[in-house]
Image: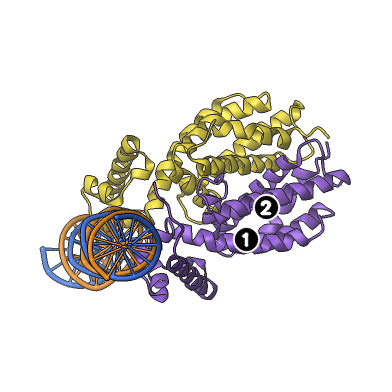
Chain colours: A purple, B yellow, C blue, D orange
Amino acid sequence: MKTRAPQKRRLQTRARLLSEAEKIVTTQGYSALRVEDVVAQAGVAKGTLFSHFKDKDGLLAVLIGARVMEDLEKMETLPPPTSVDDLIQKLEPCLSFVAQDRVIFDVLLRYSGSTGSEVNEVVTESFVRQITLFARWLGQMQQVQKIRDDAPAEVLAEGIQAFLNHVLALWFCAEHANDDSPAKALAPLLQVWLKPQA
Amino acid sequence: MKTRAPQKRRLQTRARLLSEAEKIVTTQGYSALRVEDVVAQAGVAKGTLFSHFKDKDGLLAVLIGARVMEDLEKMETLPPPTSVDDLIQKLEPCLSFVAQDRVIFDVLLRYSGSTGSEVNEVVTESFVRQITLFARWLGQMQQVQKIRDDAPAEVLAEGIQAFLNHVLALWFCAEHANDDSPAKALAPLLQVWLKPQA
DNA sequence: CAGATATATTGACCGTGGTCAGTTTAATTT
DNA sequence: AAATTAAACTGACCACGGTCAATATATCTG
């Protein structure tokens, strides 16, 4: 089983595909991305794209994963939240990025949990990183008695993930009559999750 | 704007489409359902199907919604859970039905939250009914001090929805290496959600 | 009953994602 | 440098969901 390193041409092709794809999503949005447009602009055949990415979602996952990573980097420089409201405020950029387009939500939901089954999966990496960050924040909040400490920070972090997805799912279901942002719906749930009064 | 009642022929056609579709999903699974097969077996043209259902997911939603309704009817006859573990056990049928096929999860997630925007949407109805049932159960558990009572039963019920979707999402991400059932993953989360020790 | 009008169905056609046997290009070997 | 082998790319082709102008069938109205 010989497996050589990818040759230069291949890396260039991949880079071109990604950059053209990015152009499209930034100008027309994620859901407007068509495989045929990407390959046309990149000047390659359709089959080439699918030799670089498992499917269209695989390409999107790389773009979205990279984007999420940027958000995370910013978040990691932030001081830990001082309250649940502050936490929600710090979560807001992530939330509104995903809320902008259904396909973002779908792709993240599809790839996020996978425990590194596919190598090189940016989304998986970002997922782990997000959980880690949440757990760190929550751990620090526990130490200063801002939130409950009867459960491991990791479990609380997982719950935040669940609630984020929940409010996003509701957001996309409501479609039209969504008066306010997903962040609004998050507040009561996180209060109950992180600060039980019993 | 005249709007007559649907004529008999139309109802028969719809019934035939649904029954043929059901045959397919029970023998080959939900993800094996092809529109062309359904119309071929029902003996109608493809366009007919799309005049009865918005899209393929719309057809699936009716089938899945009906199926979920059956589960709910059984659950509604059950006595309220006496503990969190008992609750999880009573949730298990729902969970393992959805866990059997990704498209079930996708369809439910897509339609579940919609607040009756599309009339006649079985899934929406089942969603409301499920939340109501959960809230009733939780309310009763609160009264006998089995779970926290510092939050309205409706909020706790919504949280259960969120956690159900969460463990299901993880289940489908893991795909292969899914050691145990989604219900296993649910337990620690629901314990922390419903019985804070602080 | 003969139009007139609303409802139901048709199927050729399209868009788009994805495949794969075959060809070109690059790296290795002799 | 020629022959060999592996990697990269190609584009005709397919599968499948979904559309819509045209047609057929039912219902209503004078």
Q: Chain of mark 1?
A: A
Query: Mark 2 and 1 residues: CB-CB less than 8 Å, in contact?
Result: yes
| Residue A54 seen from this side | yes
| Residue B49 seen from this side | no
Residue B185, horizontal then vertical, whole percent? 61, 34
Instruction: Reply above or below: D19 against A150.
Output: below
Q: Amino acid at mark 2?
A: Gln
Tell me the residue that label 1 is attached to.
A68
Q: Looking at this view, is A156 or A118 the one in front?
A: A118
Tell me the residue that label 2 is attached to.
A130
Q: Residue furthest right?
A: A144
Element assignment for label 1:
helix
Element assignment for label 2:
helix
Residue at image position (81%, 43%) is A195
Residue B138, horizontal then vertical, whole percent? 68, 33
Labels 2 and 1 positioned on one and the same chain: yes
Residue A177, horizontal then vertical, whole percent? 59, 62
Quarter-of-image position of residue B76: top right
Residue at image position (77%, 36%) is A151
Q: Chain of mark 2?
A: A
Quarter-of-image position of residue A87: bottom right
Q: Residues within 10 Å of mark 2 (few under 14, many from 20)?
A: many
Q: Earlier in the sequence, mark 2 or mark 1?
A: 1
Instruction: Reply above or below: D2 against B125.
Output: below
Q: Looking at this view, is A15 or B119 the one in front?
A: A15
Residue D4, horizontal then vertical, whole percent? 26, 56
Q: Amino acid at mark 1?
A: Val
Residue at image position (57%, 39%) is B130
Q: Looking at this view, is A77 or A149 the one in front?
A: A77
* Number of marks present in the image shown: 2
Q: Residues within 10 Å of mark 1 (few under 14, many from 20)?
A: many
Which mark identifies residue B49?
none
